[in-house]
């Protein structure tokens, strides 16, 4: 029993490191960049509040598990902003190694339960994973809109880039959320363009 508890606490202590992984998205109040732990927490709240946007085959409890686990690998692999430049295959390989190490801290039965949830999210083939991925892509634009542009300005992002890299993924699991976001994003870029003229 003591060894099991030691392993559980070791995993939880390791997970604390996610609080030090900084992301490219600013907080809604534009005061600073968020960290990956804050992002994961916020996404679980998105899932809880926006559960009415999920399809009939989506188990919100499973989605919440996915979202609280999905970025743990960033402890080792770091965050790769969607509008940044990176080699996707290399990142995927780094994340798999990170998952081996981090989930490997757990007792075997817990590792065998939680690692597949993370894998399901990564594969994005099930309704639960597709909805979770949609929320993961939906939250940053909502924060960018609230903060006055955030990472879109930092990365010189266009409306078309958002539609291609973000919109396509949101619309798979939550089409109404993409419709909502697309309208808000279009207005943001229209106002921004008008202010430049």
Image: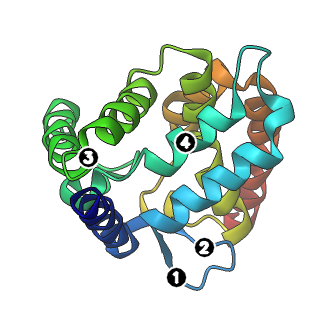
Residue designated by label 3: 107
Residue 131: x %, y % from top left:
64, 28
Q: Are marks 1 and 3 in contact (CB under 8 Å)?
A: no
Which badge, 2 or 3, comes first in the chain's sequence?
2
Residue 192: x %, y % from top left:
70, 60
Nearest to the observer: residue 56 or residue 27: 56
Q: Label 2: how many residues lie within 10 Å, few (<14), some (14-19) or many (20+)?
A: some
> Which residue is painted at 60% across and 33% down in the image?
62
Q: Would you say 29 lies left or right of 36 here?
A: right
Q: How is the image coloured?
A: rainbow
In the displayed structure, 77 sits above or below 122; it is below
Marks 1/4: CA–CA distance: 27 Å
Q: Label 3: how many residues lie within 10 Å, few (<14), some (14-19) or many (20+)?
A: some
> Which residue is painted at 70% across and 63% down in the image?
197
Location of the N terminus by quadrant is bottom left
> Which residue is painted at 61% across and 35% down in the image?
63
Residue designated by label 4: 65
Residue designated by label 1: 32
Q: Quadrant of residue 148?
A: bottom right
Q: Are marks 2 and 1 in contact (CB under 8 Å)?
A: yes
Which badge, 3 or 4, comes first in the chain's sequence?
4
Which residue appears farthest toward the front when viewing the image? 1
Helix, strand, or loop for circle 4?
helix
Which badge, 1 or 4, comes first in the chain's sequence?
1
Single out the mark in the foreground, 4 or 2: 4
Q: Would you say 128 lies left or right of 3 here?
A: right
Residue designated by label 2: 27
Nearest to the observer: residue 95 or residue 105: 105
């Amino acid at each position: 029993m003591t060894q099991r508890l030691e392993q559980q606490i070791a995993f939880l202590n390791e997970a604390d490191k996610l609080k030090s992984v900084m992301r490219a998205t600013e907080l809604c109040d534009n005061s600073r960049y968020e960290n990956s732990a804050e992002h994961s927490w916020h996404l679980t709240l998105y899932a809880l509040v926006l559960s009415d946007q999920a399809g009939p085959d989506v188990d919100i409890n499973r989605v919440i598990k996915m979202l609280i686990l999905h970025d743990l690998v960033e402890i080792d692999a770091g965050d790769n902003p969607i509008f940044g430049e990176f080699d996707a295959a290399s990142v995927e390989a780094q994340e798999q190694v990170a998952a081996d190490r981090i989930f490997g801290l757990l007792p075997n039965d817990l590792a065998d339960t939680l690692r597949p949830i993370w894998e399901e999210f990564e594969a994005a083939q099930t309704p639960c994973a597709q909805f979770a991925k949609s929320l993961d892509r939906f939250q940053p634009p909502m924060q960018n809109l609230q903060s006055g542009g955030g990472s879109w300005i930092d990365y010189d992002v266009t409306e078309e880039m958002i539609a291609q890299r973000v919109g396509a993924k949101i619309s798979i699991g939550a089409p109404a959320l993409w419709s909502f976001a697309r309208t808000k994003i279009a207005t943001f870029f229209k106002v921004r363009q008008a202010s430049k003229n």
